[in-house]
Image: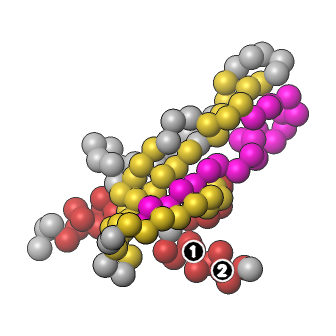
Amino acid sequence: MENYLDFLKLVLPSFLVDYFDIVKSEKKHEVLHLYFEERNTPPRSSSSTLMSKGFHKEVIIQDFPLRGNSVYLHVKRRRWTDQSSGEIIQRDWNLVAQGTRMTQEFAAFLKEISRY
């Protein structure tokens, strides 16, 4: 299993492998859609009063093409409620490069190749 996760980290952004589960995949023509949901692991492990309260709206991010297929990552981030304060808790993810709908790595790659 460990080799499988190491391989996925080469193909997908590593934060997806570490904190999200793949719940579905679809291939339509030359487009691959991968669906992820954040695991129910609260961001603050010290607080035992956090309760999962579902997900935020899905974010769709374009990533590196794989074997001639465009790749879109459908990411659902989880939110928790602190039972003692009523505060909504979530992880702060930098999923998308600023000003784009692409992963940061893909945007950096495109920026680099456009210089030549």
Q: Is residue 25 magenta?
A: no
Residue at the limit of the structure toward the top, as seen here: 85
Residue identifier under label 2: 4
For mark 1, what is the residue? 8
Relative to 114, does residue 61 appear above or below in the rendering? above
Can residue 13 be seen from the camera position used here? no
**Which residue does the image show at 56% across and 39% down from the upper left?**
92
Query: Percent from the top left, x then y, of residue 73?
Result: 45, 57
Q: Are marks 1 and 2 in contact (CB under 8 Å)?
A: yes
Name the residue at 71% across, 31% down.
Answer: 53
Residue at disc 2, secondary structure: helix
54 relative to 10 in the view: left or right: right
Query: Can you name the residue that lies furthest to the front here?
Result: 29
Q: The C terminus appears in which quarter of the rendering?
A: bottom left
Q: Residue at x 50, y 68 (%)?
A: 12
Query: Up-down: is 72 above or below 44?
Result: below
Distance of label 1 from label 2 (alpha carbons): 6 Å
Q: Which stretch appears magenta?
A: 32-52
Q: Position of residue 108 (x, y in %)?
A: 30, 61
